[in-house]
Amino acid sequence: MSLLKKCAQQLLEKTNLSSQTIAATTSAFHTSPICNRVQAGRYRVTTKRNRALTYEMANPPHYIAHRKAWNSWNTSTMLDGLRSSQTAIEDLFMRKFMTGTWHALIVSEVIIKRQHNMIRISAIVRQAISPRKMYFLIGYTEELLSYWLQCPVTLELQTVADKNDVIFKYI
């Protein structure tokens, strides 16, 4: 008799519980092997192979720090780091603000780098608007984020003529 059944019988004898209660508690024990299938951070292959991926998206998550980089560079996630939750919320806010302000212009991931009291935001932007409007959006974004976050914010933007220029491969 298996060890699990022996333990269940001893528990039943000592506590006088019904067999249905014991069966319910023992059915939650799984003996299947560990499932090593890693799915997170990977893109599914489409049937027509028409999903465009950038270089960062094409590399799986286990290549972080080898062939791809982190999207946020800061020291708050270290052991006993300060403001880790506030930093994560601020990073999310900055990304949402950038994608909303630069609507349909950002063609890559928004990279946030924090150094001392300064925040640098990097992205690749399409050249779909005039340079005058682009300079206005740069100043507008830097001023508002600097005011809200209470530290200097600098945008480091690269421009491409077409969004197809950043496509690495199709899956």
Image: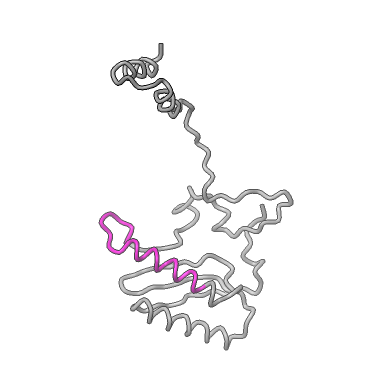
Q: Which of 66 and 87 is in front in this view?
A: 87
Q: What residue occupies the far left of the structure in this picture?
A: 80
Where 147 sits versus 52, above or below? below
Q: Position of residue 40 (x, y in %)?
A: 52, 48
Residue 4 falls in which quadrant of the image? top left
Residue 11, percent from left and from top: 32, 20
Image quadrant where one finds the N terminus: top left
* Magenta stretch contains residue 4: no
Height in image: 30 above or below 146? above
Q: Nearer the viewer, residue 23 or 60?
A: 23
Q: Which residue lies furthest to the bottom in this view?
A: 132
Residue 73 quadrant: bottom left
Is 157 in front, or is 102? 102
Magenta run includes residue 96:
yes
Would residue 123 be found to the left or right of residue 20 on screen?
right
Between 19 and 27, the residue placed more toward the observer is: 19
Residue 66 horizontal/vertical position (percent): 46, 52
Quick one: which residue is furthest to the top in this view? 1
Residue shown at 30%/64% (left/top)? Answer: 83
Side (left or right) of 165 relative to 101? right
In the rendered view, does 41 fall on the left or right side of 24?
right
* Residue 141 location (% of width, % of height): 47, 80
Specify the segment rendered in magenta. 76-98
* Whether residue 74 is situated above or below residue 136 in the rendered picture: above
Q: Going by the image, does 32 lie left or right of 3?
A: right
Most prominent secondary structure in the magenta stretch? helix
The residue sitting at 48% across, 69% down in the picture is 95
